[in-house]
Amino acid sequence: MYKPHCDTCGDLEFALVDGYNVRDRMLEDVWFRIKETETGFIAESLPQDGRYLSDFNMTKILKEIAEYASEQDLLTCPKCRADIEGPMVGA
C-alpha cells in the first residue's frame, strides 16, 4: 500500500495532486488530497476550493484524479510542496 513520505517532512497522511494534470486550466492550482485505502486510491478536494468546485461533477473529477495519481512516479508534499515519490516508483 502506498504511504506518502517526504524526505523533509517525514511520513504523511496524504499526498497532493494539482488538478491541472487532469483537467488543464479548468483545475489549474486546485489541489486534491490523495490516499490509498484497502479498495484503491481516493481523491478529496480541499475545503477552501468547495465554492469553486460546487458547479462541477465532482464524482467524475475525483475518480479521474485518483486514477491519475495511482499511475504517477511523483506527487506533492502537502506541507512543503516538494516532489515526493508516487505509488509507481519501483513498480
Image (spheres, rainbow, N blue to C red):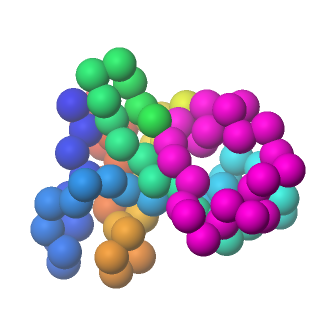
**Residue in view at x 30 percent, y 30 percent:** 37
Residue most toward the top? 39
**Residue pictured at 21% horizontal, 45% vertical:** 3
Q: Position of residue 54 (x, y in %)?
A: 78, 53
Q: Is residue 89 left or right of residue 10?
A: right
Q: How many marks?
A: 0
Residue 41 in which image quadrant? top left
Residue visible at 37% across and 56% down in the picture: 15
> Considering only vertical position in the picture, is 41 above or below 23?
above
**Percent x, y for residue 29?**
67, 71
Q: Observer-nearest residue: 76 or 40?
A: 40
Vertical placement of residue 55 versus 70, above or below: below
In the image, residue 52 lies in the stretch drawn in magenta: yes
* Whole-percent x, y for residue 60 in the image: 72, 31
Residue 86, position in %: x, y? 35, 48
Out of 91 and 18, give the one closest to the viewer: 18
Magenta segment main secondary structure: helix
At x 36%, y 42%, the residue is 35
